[in-house]
Every structure is written in structure tokens, then in C-alpha cells.
Image (spheres, rainbow, N blue to C red):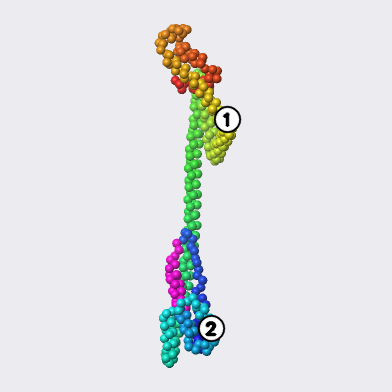
Amino acid sequence: MRLLPLLLALSLAGCSSVPPQAKPSAPPAAIAPDPKPANDAQSSVDAAAQERLSKLSANVNAAATAPNIEASPVAVNELTVAQGRLSDVKPDPVEVAAAAERRALQEAGRAAEARANAEAAADQGRTDAIRIAELQAIATSERARADAAVAAYAAQAEKNRIENQKAIDAALAKAKKAREELDNAERSEQVAWCNKIGFGALGLAVALMAGSWLLGGLAAIRKMGPAAGLVAFVGLCALWAARVLGHPWFMPGMTLVIVAVIAWVVIWWRKHDKRGDINEELAKRGAKAKATLEKLVPTIDAVYREGTQTVEEVLATIKGGAKASIQDLLDSVLFSKLSSKLDQPEKDTVKEVRGTVDPIQLS
């Protein structure tokens, strides 16, 4: 009968007294609360439970090694099972010493003292069980509080995220509206200037025609008509531009046109680059220019080196004498020699170059 409380305690110890722990996770935007109180409470529960198991292991071992234990086969069997269940629990040294003390009292014939010692230990065990239950309740409460705090922080983080997103969307919408207003203001200013230029040009054209009529009549109008017409045309173009700029599709349309032009240029360039006709054309022109220069430069150098005569001496050999023009002088000294040195392809190259050069730029 004395083994009944021990076996009852053992059966209770075999049941897990620690419930599964929640594992809350806060989103990155939330600052998780301090988990230390809940963790400390659970550590206290674990330590108290481990202490009880250590003491129980010592009690079971002491019972299994009691004198004449073989006389109770049932007790031996159950103690064997209990030792197996507690095989991973290290016996508490203090409880081992207390069990040894109770055994020594029993063997010394002091059974009453041994019994009193056992009753006191059993009372302490019941007190420890109550304490473990209280600690478990505290741990459960702390864990629930921590989970609630994490949930509150997660909810607040989500609320903050939604509010921040609303603020960002509002700021973007405001910026977009401001940009549109700025674009509209710039477009309005451009339209206003185009209208001013258009009406101003038309007014100037009318003024030119009216002034010509007053000053010279129909003949003056005929002379001033082209200029007034050009001014009026510029005015009409400006008014047309004002109407075009005022449409919202102007910028997208211009963008599409520019993209189309760039795409066409790229496609055209790649097409001719694959064919090689661009490089071929450039090589042909370079060869023509090189052939022409190979004859031009030596001839000009020769004229310069041989040009030791005075202008009067040269003029004496030219038809017209001293009254000869600069063109006659250049034809006699330079261009006649160049003409004799250059073949028809080189002369054609010179004509092509002359056709692309504005004589005014050389003056």
C-alpha cells in the first residue's frame, strides 16, 4: 500500500503538463513585444517539472532496491516499468540522500520516524505539484498576453501600411495633378504666344497691303504682295499651331511621330549597312576625292614654286594686258594648268564639290 502514492505520482508524471507553445510571428513592419516574461515563466515551469521528475526518479530507484522487494512481484513489475520511463532523467542527489536516510531509519527499527519522514516528503511533493500548476497558469497567461501583443502589433502594422499606402497614393495623385496643371499652363502659354504671333502677323500683312495701297497704289501692292503673303502665311501657320498645341493628343502624337522617324532611320541604316552600299558609296567618294587631290595638290605646289614672275610680267602675256581681270590672271597662272592635269572624272568631282559649297561662305 505504501507504493500506491508513488505509483500514482509516477502515472501523473508520465502525462505532459506543458501545453503546445504558440509561435507568433510579426510582419516586418511590426516591432514584436518583449517575449522575455513569457519565456521566463515557461522556464520556471520547465525547471519545476524537471525537479519533480528528478526527485521521482530517485524515489523509484530507492523503491526498486528496497529489501525483500521480490516478495511483491506486482510492485517489482511496475517499478521496472517506472525505471524505464525515467531512464533519461537523472536522479536528484538530495532526494537520493533523503531516501537513503528513510531506509536507514527503517532498517534501524525506527519505523515511525521513517514514516513521518516519508509523509513530510509526500506533503512537499503535493505542495510542489500545486506550485507547478500555478507556474503553468502564469506561463499560459504570459504566453497569451504575448500572443495578443504580437497580434495587436501586427494589426497596427497592417493599419499603418494601409494608411501609408493611402498617403503615398494621395501624394502621387497630387504630383500627377500638379504635373498636368503645369503642362496645361505651359501649353496654354504656348497657345497664347502662337495666337499673338498669328494675329500679329496677319495684322502686319494687312498693314503692309494697306500701306502699299496708300503709298503707291496697285503697283506698290503688286511689289509688296509676296512679302505680305509670306507674313500672312506665317500668321496662319502660327494660328494653326495654336489649335494643334491645344489638343491633348498633341504630345502623344508627336511622341509617336518621333519614335516612328527614329525607327525608320534605324531600319534604313541597318538595311543599307547589311548591304554595304553606304560604306561602298563612302569608299567611292573617298577614292574620287583622293584621286582629285593627288593631282590638285602637286599642281598648286608647282604653281607656287614656279610663281617667281611679277604680276606685270604675267599680265603682259595675257590677252588684254594690264586691263586683264583677276579671273584672266588665275586662268593663266593656275586653272589652265589644273585643267590640263585633271581628267574628266576629277573635273566632275570638282564640279560636285563646287555645287555643294556656298560661294558666300568663302568671301
Does any portion of residue 303 appear in the rendered image? yes
253 to 234, vertically: above or below = below
Q: Amino acid at mark 1?
A: Asp
Q: Magenta stretch: give its range.
A: 31-53
Query: Residue at coordinates 53% horizontally, 88% vertically from top-left?
Result: 72
Residue 184 versus residue 335 in the image, above or below? below
Q: Residues within 10 Å of mark 1 (few under 14, many from 20)?
A: few
- What amino acid is found at the position of numbered circle 2 in the picture? Glu
Sequence-wise, the earlier of marks 2 and 1 is 2
Residue nearest the observer in this picture, 161 or 122: 122
Residue for point 52% across, 78% down: 85
Is residue 205 one of those drawn in magenta?
A: no
> Which residue position holds label 1?
277
Q: Is residue 43 magenta?
A: yes
Q: Which quadrant holds residue 109?
A: bottom left
Residue drawn at the location 49% of the way across and 74% of the way down: 18
Which mark, residue 78?
2
